[in-house]
Structure formats: C-alpha cells, structure tokens
Amino acid sequence: MQLRIVISLSVVFLAIGLFAQNEPYTERQIRIYDEIGENLAIIKNSGRDYVLPMDINWNYYYLTGDESEGAILLMNGRTKTSTIYKTQAEYRRRMPDNEANNLKDLKDFNSDLMLQLGRTKTLWVDYSSMVNFEELGQRMQNLESINNLAPIIHNMRKIKDEHEMELLSYAIETTAAGLREVMKAAEPGMNEKDFELILKYKFQKADCEHLGFGIQAASGPNATHVHYGNNDRQTEKGDMMVFDVGARFAYYTADISRSFPVSGKFTKEQKEIYGLVLKAQKAAINTMKKGVNIQIPANNALDVLNQGLFELGLITDSNSGWQKRFWIQHGFFHHIGLVVHDVGGYGGILEPGMIITMEPGLYFPADYLESAKRRLSRSVDSAEIDEFIKKVKPIFNKYINIGVRIEDDVYITENGNKVISKGVPKEIDEIEKLMKETSLFNN
Ligand code: GLY
Ligand code: MN
Ligand code: MN
C-alpha cells in the first residue's frame, strides 16, 4: 500500500517535472499574448551571436527554447496559438524539447500569415529579426500599425525567471570553481595559456561547453589592458594577474573577474590598489537594491576610488572633473544573461530578478601618463596636465604594471541582493590562503 503511494507520488512528481520543463517558454509566451491582445506577432530566428559560431536571435530563443536557423515564430493573439515555421532540414535536425510551440513547414508561413493578417489590426514584429517587409507589403494593406516587439521582450529578459536563475547560477558557480582552481595552480613561470587551459578543462568537465566571451588571463603588463585575450606570455615573479572569465551553460553566461599576484603574495603596492578597488566594489554592491537607480552604486564606487586615489597621491584635486575620470577606463556594470552584455541597458531602476555585474578596476600601464596629454589635449589646458604629471609621476612609478579588476554577478532580491559569484574569494587574506593550496594541475 505504502509502496503504491510512493510510486504514484513519484509519477506525479515526474509529470510535474516534465511539465516544468515546458513552463518557462509557455509562461513567457503568455506574457507576450498579454501585450499583443488580439493581434499577431512575428519573431524570426536570424542574427548572430557575437561569440558562438551560430545564427540566433536570442529573443526568439527566449520565447521558444528552439535554435532552428531561419525559423519564424508566429503568435496569434486571437487564438492564442504559437507556431514555429522551420525548414525541412531543421525539422529533421532538431526536435524541440518543449511543447510551447506547434510546428509547421517554413514554406507554409506566407500563406498562413496572409490568412491570419486579414483579422489583425496591428502586427507586432521583433525588429531585430529582420522579417522581409517588402515581401509582406501587399498583405499589410489593411493593417493600422506595425509595432516593435523587441523592447517588450528585452524588458522581460532583464528580469530573470526561475529557470534562467538556475542556468545562470550554474554557469556562475562553474566559473567560480575554475577561478579557484587557477588561484591554487598559480606559480611564476606558468604561461598565461596554461591558466586558460585549466579554466577550459574545468568548464568542459562541468558540461559548460561554451564560453560567454574569450578568456582573459593577463599577467604583468598585460594585466593593465582592459581587454586582453592573447594569453601567451610567460608569467614572472611579481606579476599581478587579471582574469576575466565566463563559462556558459545552456547559453547563459557568467562574467567574473579576479586579480591576484601570480606568486600568491601581494606586495605593499598591489595591496594598496587591490584594497581600494575592493572597497569601491563593496560600496557599490552594498547599495545595489530594489528601487535604486543603477547609476548610484556605480557613482559610489567612483567616489571611493577617487578618495583613495587622492589619498595615494594619484590625483591632485578630488573635485576636478577630468581627474575624476583620469584612471577610469571602463564602465562598472551591465546585465548578464543569454549574452554577456545582456539586454537591459546601462541605466534605470534596479528590480528584483535582475542579475548585474559590478566591476570597478584600476590599471597602470607604463605609458599612461605620457599618453595623457594626447588623450586630454582637447579638453584640458596643457599647463594643467603638465603640472599634474609632474606631481603624480613619482607616485605612479610605484604602481606601473599593476592592474586590478574585481567583478561579481549580483542578483537583486526583494530585500537587497545576493552575490552569486561569491564562491571565489576576493579578500586579500582569503586569496593568499587559497593560493597556498595545491591544484590538480601542479606538477
Ligand atoms: N568580460 C567583459 C566584461 O566584463 O564586461
Ligand atoms: Mn562584465
Ligand atoms: Mn568580465
């Protein structure tokens, strides 16, 4: 008797589990129906991922879970039916693993659309999907308007649902585990490529087949380049390293940066810069909360950096506009999701469900002061720059070749936030402690 209950309960749970697989796409489509009313929507799967060698429109994928190249999703708001039209080749190649969509041959799309258009006043089109309007021209005569669906899908995509949270969390935890491994493995003399290979090994072992972007394993002078991907230098004692890495799971990508000395022990100067960036990053994360404009945490990070740079003598006037930006080489945040710089923009109010990076950094390339005159020549008086360089140079010299970026993935909750990438340490003492451990990859 008891066993029978257990068995039937298991079947129920299995059924719920299978249903749950279809749920995210069905749920997302229901929200689109809420927006389009009785009208039609067309979303074509065309476009390019900027890392993976695949044609994809992530808006299409988000609504269908389907990757068929060139396929079109037609959503009929009156009948509430969603149909994917795909080529015969794609039909054979991929069976969809969810039931949110009906399937038809792509060659039926035009005639089906023509039939259904007769009853619709507004055609919603995902502009990024490049539907052939010329071809449609004739059939659109009775339409009152054509609306852009993309902003609606983007608004949905910037708030991650439970399904997306699971996928992203796994990508982020896998990335954190990879970074822990390179911290343990690090020793002077290793090539940057060795670190890249350790990360790739760890990711592929964890079923993260793809990367969200090219791995940055930068050492010494390379660590002062914001974007670096050659990964071919032999590391030396005394080098700082900057890693910027994102494993991708089911296309969702993490984005974590960590910086540490290859030898496992921070010098005084490395500590000063690292400590400052960490303080700025924490100040920002502390204010990443529901209802707050995302510019506020970013400005908090900037204020902390400026105060610290002033105390170190790396800027001479903390009220000068140009000096405030002098050492800042990149933005501090972006949404992550199906692409690393995900839809959602760089402004606006934080809402529960957003996953946003916070990634301040400071970099001291050897030629930075010399190049300042050229960079600032249009906006700042040259005597003022000369004076600045004269004062700052002796201090700057101590920090040449130090690069630090600390980047975490922050999930906005109802009550505050959760740092999903916290599995890889960022406190100086924790990093030094972890780096004393040995790795699988040490000889
Ligand atoms: N990895 C690119 C970025 O941090 O934005
Ligand atoms: Mn980032
Ligand atoms: Mn990054």
Image (tube, rainbow, N blue to C red):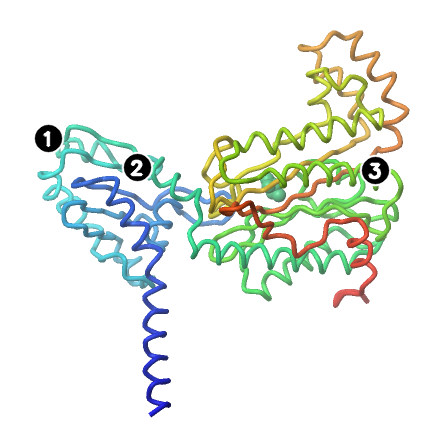
Ligand number 2: quarter of image: top right
The residue under label 1 is: 142
Q: CA distance from mark 3 to mark 1?
A: 67 Å
| Number of residues whose C-alpha sits closer than 10 Å to that of mark 1, classed few (under 14), some (14–19) or many (20 or more) | few
Q: Secondary structure at mark 2?
A: loop
Which of the image's four quarters has the N terminus?
Answer: bottom left
Which amino acid type corresponds to the residue marked 3 in the rendered image?
Glu
Q: Earlier in the sequence, mark 3 or mark 1?
A: 1
**Which residue is more in the foreground, 237 or 194?**
237
Which amino acid type corresponds to the residue marked 2 in the rendered image?
Leu
Given this view, does label 3 or label 1 mark the residue nearer the observer?
Answer: 3
The residue under label 2 is: 149
Residue 301, image x, y percentages: 67, 33
Q: CA distance from mark 1 to mark 2?
A: 20 Å
Which amino acid type corresponds to the residue marked 1 in the rendered image?
Asn
Given this view, does label 1 or label 2 mark the residue nearer the observer?
Answer: 2
Q: Give the numbered dot on residue 272.
A: 3
